[in-house]
Image (cartoon, grey):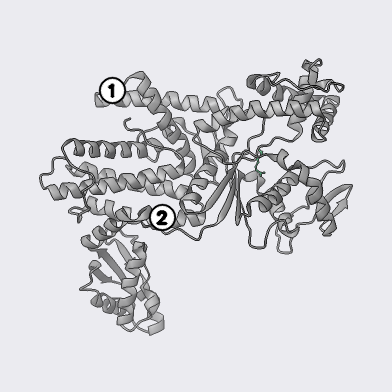
Amino acid sequence: MQKILDLISEEMKQAFEAAGYDPELGKATLSNRPDLCEYQCNGAMAGAKKYRKAPLAIAQEVAENLQNSETFSQVDAVAPGFLNMKVKESFVRDYLRDMSGADKFGFQTPESKKIIIDYGGPNVAKPLHVGHLRSGIIGESIKRICRYAGHDVIGDIHLGDWGLQMGLIITELHKRQPDLIYFDDSYEGEYPKEAPFTISELEEIYPTASAKSKEDDSYKADAMDATYKLQSGVRGYRALWDHIIAVSVADLKKNYANLNVEFDLWKGESDVHDIIPGMVEEMKKGGYAYESDGALVVDVKEETDTKEVPPCMILKSDGASLYNTTDLATIMDRMENFHPDRLIYLTDKRQDLYFEQVFRCARKTKLVNEDTELVHIGFGTMNGKDGKPFKTREGGVMRLENLIREINEEMIRKIRDNAQTKGYEIDVEQARETAKIVGLAAIKYGDLSNQASKDYIFDLDRFTSFEGDTGPYILYTIVRIKSILAKFEEQGGKLTDIVIQEAVNDPEKSLMLELTKYNAMMEMVCEEIAPHKICAYIYDLANVFNRFYHETKILTETDNDRKAGWIALLKLTKEILETCIELLGFSAPDRM
Ligand code: ARG
């Protein structure tokens, strides 16, 4: 479907042309004076110079041509030369009827592309903490948005499963349990199926080992040696590594499932280990990689750089590969196996320069095609109320599970308070279930409503509030509509034979006009990969809906057509809100 602003602009363009002016002057925009009009056009101001005529005179001629328009109920030429328009109720009604019947409410999807989204990026054996929250939440939403836009999308978690942390864990295990069969070089039999540790032990082992390695050089040397042995395929080490991965991944799956985050691929840095030597060889042969202080590097600086962009290091002087190396090899692997048109990465924005280097290196060494799009979305930090990175009350790193627990507890409290004020009973189990759904919305909306690159403050009380720009407020609005629709059906109404009517009051028209913006909003969201614009839209939509709701007695309306028209409007509002929250990665309960 055409966007409503395009339809309006077209009508304006014809009017400019009919008056003898350049039709391009007819571009319309939303009004920035909603008290005066709904749309406006500033073309007469722009045309004044070209036609050597007073802008007001031009505006008046154009307005004259629109007096009998099917689209406008009012077109005013006002000093010094603005055109202020209001659209007819019938025009809006017809537009919304078309939207209700159209696929994706008339949102026209762009040309379909193959996209890989690299998000989540947790490191195996390290506890999942709030730092990984943003990557998971934003990445999941972007994946859903891209899919909705008709692209062929693969989400890959890209586990950090190959670095020094693995060697550290193995070293610590060795110190604690030197008799483990995995450390017996002469052992040739099969290794046990059961891991010699649990996830809680694993999560304790890593920080312990990491702390020791910082204080003790020989411990660190052991860990590096263990990493080397693992990477060169020593059997016992590989078997231990398999256990670490299995135990960690099971835990990660549980955590991400709680967040409604789902990956298509569970690949990791380790998956490209075998293709690194070949890639490095090619980079040398192509004359791109050269030795510098013993290390192998590729220059990636460009003439237009205003800041220093250091070379991309491919191998360290001891021949070991780095984070860079696995990322480049992963790009090569993805290109060969999936032929993506676009690769999107989500990490903390502190990795901005890193990805700039990797992308330049990938282009220079021809790992990607000339038109492959490489996109890094660097997000800001989630801060506490003190403006510093979010911590537990004790000052430690907050584990994701605990954060979710805190939110859910607060949500249960608010849900029960709300039930009490409204005077209905809610049992504990039901409150708990609802709190899980609403709590997730609170976290995700709290995050996604900020532009990704910005830092934001995690505010438990605000995020879980039923009022204001929050997830629970949006859900509350949806639940309210659901309940009206259910009552309408209880009264014998049918949701299948209702149709949107002309607006009869201002709040209703505002709601209708807000709904007409859907496809333009969605187009922008997809173009800019900007989930926060969905949040801004549904917040506005929920606000205009609630204003309409408070001023209209819907279910007691005696004019049946009018009532059915309102119900149709509510149904469309609900469907749009539900589509939007689905794209943000959460859902609404039936009651709250
Ligand atoms: N594991 C990394 C970290 O915790 C994030 C991985 C991001 N993805 C990538 N392809 N580099 O910093």
The yes-or-no answer for disc 1 within 8 Å of ligand 1 is no
Q: Give the answer, above or below, for where 253 lies relative to 359.
A: above
Return the disc, 1 or 2, that comes first in the chain's sequence.
Answer: 1
Give the spatial CA distance, label 1 vs label 2: 38 Å
* Element on which disc 1 rests: helix
Type of residue at label 2? Met
Residue 348 percent location from the top left of the image? 61, 42
Q: Residues within 10 Å of mark 1 (few under 14, many from 20)?
A: few
The yes-or-no answer for disc 2 within 8 Å of ligand 1 is no
- Marks 1 & 2, CB-CB < 8 Å contact: no
Q: Quadrant of ligand 1?
A: top right
Front residue (pair 5, 178): 178
What residue sits 42% from the left and 34% below the top? Answer: 462
Q: Which quadrant holds the N terminus? A: bottom left
What residue sits 63% from the left and 55% below the top? Answer: 339
What residue sits 24% from the left and 48% below the top? Answer: 568
* Residue that mark 2 sits on: 521
Q: Which mark is residue 420?
A: 1
Q: Is residue 450 left or right of residue 562?
A: right
Q: Is residue 100 left or right of residue 250?
A: left
